[in-house]
Amino acid sequence: MKKISFVIPCYNSSKTIESVVNEIVTTVNKRDDEYEIILVNDCSTDDVWNVIKKLRKDNRRIKGICFAKNFGQHSALMAGYNKASGDIVVSLDDDGQTPADEVYSLIDKLNEGYDVVYASYDHKQHSSARNLGTKLNNMMCEKLLGKPKGLTITSYFVAKRFVIDEIKKYSNSYAYVPGLVLRTTNSIASVPVNHRAREEGKSGYSFAKLIALWMNGFTAFSVKPLRISTFIGMMTAVIG
C-alpha cells in the first residue's frame, strides 16, 4: 500500500475547500489507501483558515499551513511539498474545478512507469483571457523549457516521491513548479479528465499576474532569454 499526499494551495476558498476535501476522502477510501491532505492558506482574505482548522480537528490526516503574507500558488505548493510524506504526491486546486474523484485515472497512469502525470482538459471552464494565457504558457514552455510537444501543463498532476524530493531542493525565489518538473524528468504523460465550472468566487490569477509568474519562471529556468537579450544588445551596439 502506497501513501498518497494531496497538496492544495488555498486562497479565498472558504466556501469550496470543504467539498474538495470530502471528495478526496470519499475517493481514497474506496481503495482503502493511506493518505494525507496538506492545505496551505496563502494569506487568504476570507475565513478559509478557520475552515482548515475545523477540517483538521475532524480528520487527523489533514495538515494545515498558514502564510503570514500572500506568496502565490507555487510557493504554497513548495511549502506543502516540504510537509508531504507520501510515496505519490497529488497537486490540485481548491475551487473544485480539478476533479478529485478522477485522481486514480492519473495514479493508474503513473503506475504504468511514468514519473509525472498531468490532467488534460478538452474543454476548460475558464475565462477566454485565462485560456489564452494557458496556451501562451504551454507554447513558451515548449520553446524555453523543453516541454514535450503535445503535453499540456496544468495545476492538477501527480508525481512520484523522487520528483518531489528534487523539487524541494530548489531554495531560490520565484519557484516555478512546471520548470522544476521538466528539469527533473522527461518521463511525463497526461490523462484527459473533466474540467468543472467554478461554483464560487473567481480565480485569484489576473492575466497580468499570470504573465508575471511565467516571466519569473522562464527567466529562472532557461538561459534562452539571456541569450536573446545578449544578441539584441550586440546587434544594437553594432547598428549604433
Image (tube, rainbow, N blue to C red):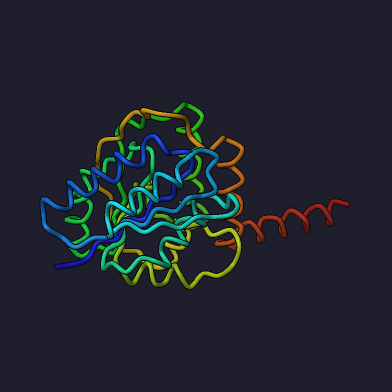
Return the residue found at the far right: 240
The residue located at (83%, 56%) in the rendering is 238
- Of 82 and 102, nearer the camera is 82
Q: How many marks?
A: 0
- Of 52 and 20, nearer the camera is 52
Image spot of residue 179 (x, y percent) = 48, 59
**Is residue 170 rendered to the left or right of residue 193?**
right
Image spot of residue 88 (x, y percent) = 27, 63
Image spot of residue 117 (x, y percent) = 29, 55
The residue located at (32%, 41%) in the rendering is 18
**Is residue 53 rendered to the left or right of residue 233?**
left
Image-quadrant location for residue 16: top left
Vertical position of residue 207 compared to residue 5: above or below: above
Image-quadrant location for residue 164: bottom left
The residue located at (30%, 35%) in the rendering is 195
Image spot of residue 146 (x, y percent) = 45, 58
For the N terminus, the image quarter is bottom left
The residue located at (28%, 50%) in the rendering is 190
Q: Is residue 135 visible?
A: no
Q: Is residue 99 visible?
A: yes
